[in-house]
Image (cartoon, rainbow, N blue to C red):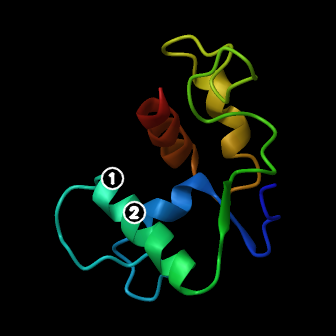
């Protein structure tokens, strides 16, 4: 029988990309392109601090990876559809120019 997890850590998928912030738990001084090696480093830091289970976006209710079994974050997206990403900027203090630039970058 597999022992139950004792210390779960829920992380947003973007957390792994905070490697350049020296105050971040995920800081990784190697100044190379992001790679699997960096994710392994993040998991090692958690394990060294007693975490035995990492949950990535467990509260998101959708997958951020291709899946044939569960809904994904990009289901329904059509290339160039700016309206698909509009919900990400609601309530953000952005000018119309910043909004347009953000949406252009997202699509």
Residue 80 position, x and y percent, is 49, 15
| Residue drawn at x 75%, y 46% as measured from the top left | 90
Q: Residue at x 57, y 31 (%)?
A: 65
Disc 1 to disc 2, C-alpha distance: 6 Å
Q: How crowded is the residue under tag 1: few (<14 C-alpha within 10 Å), some, or many (20+)?
A: few
Using residue 83 as the reference point, say whether residue 106 is left or right of it: left
Could you say which is closer to the camera, residue 86 or residue 69?
69
Cβ atoms at labels 1 and 2 below 8 Å apart: yes
Would residue 39 be visible to someone looking at this image?
Answer: yes
Q: Which mark is residue 40?
A: 2
In the rendered image, residue 49, in percent from the top left (x then y), is placed at: 58, 87
**Residue under pointer 1:** 36
- Which quadrant of the figure contains the N terminus? bottom right
Q: Is residue 24 above or below residue 90?
A: below
Q: Nearer the viewer, residue 25 or 46?
A: 46
| The quarter of the displayed image where residue 104 is located | top left
**Looking at the image, which residue is at 66% across and 23% down?**
83
Q: What secondary structure is found at the residue carrying circle 2?
A: helix
77 or 68, which is in the foreground?
A: 68
| 6 left or right of 55 in image | right
* Residue 94 in view: no
């Amino acid at each position: 029988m597999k022992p139950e997890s004792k210390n779960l850590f829920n992380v947003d998928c973007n957390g792994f990309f905070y490697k350049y912030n020296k105050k971040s738990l995920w800081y990784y001084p190697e100044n190379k392109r992001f790679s699997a090696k960096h994710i392994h480093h993040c998991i090692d830091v958690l394990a060294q601090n007693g975490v035995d289970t990492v949950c990535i976006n467990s509260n998101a209710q959708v997958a951020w990876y291709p899946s044939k079994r569960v809904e994904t974050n990009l289901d329904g997206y059509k290339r160039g559809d700016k309206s698909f990403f509009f919900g990400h900027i609601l309530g953000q203090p952005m000018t119309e120019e910043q909004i347009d630039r953000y949406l252009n970058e997202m699509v």
